[in-house]
Amino acid sequence: MIGAIVMIFTLVWIYQSGIKAKAENIFMWVGICAAVFLASQVMLYDVNIFIADLFNGKDVSSEGYERDLTSVGDRKNQEGFQSTSGAFLSYFLELMPPLVGFLILALIRLKFVTKESFSIPNLFSGINEMVSGAFKSAAESMKQGIKK
């Protein structure tokens, strides 16, 4: 669920940045970014399952280990992690895939959509405008709804 919300906002950000930069084939880039984000999510959740099983003491190196995304209990931490940082690890495993997907899409946006040079301000440019524009339009629509 968190990944879907991050993906939607990131794709809107890429679309708005592409329109502002007058990029060609912006819908193609938005589609490519959606596919890359979904692929990164699947791969990183698979890595998360592997990490969770390592911390829970399961033998992941044996031939009988065949855990996949559809196994029961994949996302549940019923036994708890056997370390003192169990809560932190649970949060990290849940938030890492969307954040890494966001960073991958930010790099794609920077190099292929806007074609800017690499720097941290350029990597995240346009996010403030997107968020403030969304809040402005929401506030205006509420004002219009109240006037009616």
Image (cartoon, rainbow, N blue to C red):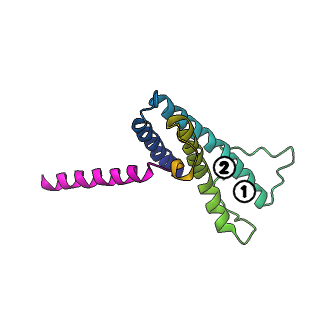
How crowded is the residue under tag 1: few (<14 C-alpha within 10 Å), some, or many (20+)?
many
- Using the image as rendered, state which of residue 46 and residue 129 is in the foreground: 129
Magenta region, mostly helix, strand or loop?
Answer: helix
| Range shown magenta | 124-148
Q: Does the magenta-highlighted stretch encompass residue 126?
A: yes
Q: Does the magenta-highlighted stretch encompass residue 84?
A: no
How crowded is the residue under tag 2: few (<14 C-alpha within 10 Å), some, or many (20+)?
few
**Residue that carries the numbered disc 2 in the rendered image:** 72
Tell me residue 120's x, y (percent).
56, 52
SS type, badge 2: loop
- Using the image as rendered, state which of residue 86 and residue 25 is in the foreground: 25
SS type, badge 1: helix
Question: Number of marks in the image?
Answer: 2
**Position of residue 80 in the picture relative to residue 36 (left or right):** right
Residue that appears at 40% across and 36% down: 19
Residue 52 is marked as: 1
Tell me residue 122's x, y (percent).
52, 48
Q: Is residue 1 visible?
A: no
Q: Is residue 83 above or below residue 121?
A: below
Residue that appears at 33% across and 50% down: 133
Q: CA distance from mark 1 to mark 2?
A: 14 Å
**For the view shown, which residue lies furthest in the left direction?**
148
- Using the image as rendered, state which of residue 58 and residue 6 is in the foreground: 6
Residue that appears at 65% across and 48% down: 45
Q: Are marks 1 and 2 in contact (CB under 8 Å)?
A: no
Q: Is residue 78 visible?
A: yes
**For the view shown, which residue lies furthest in the front direction?**
117
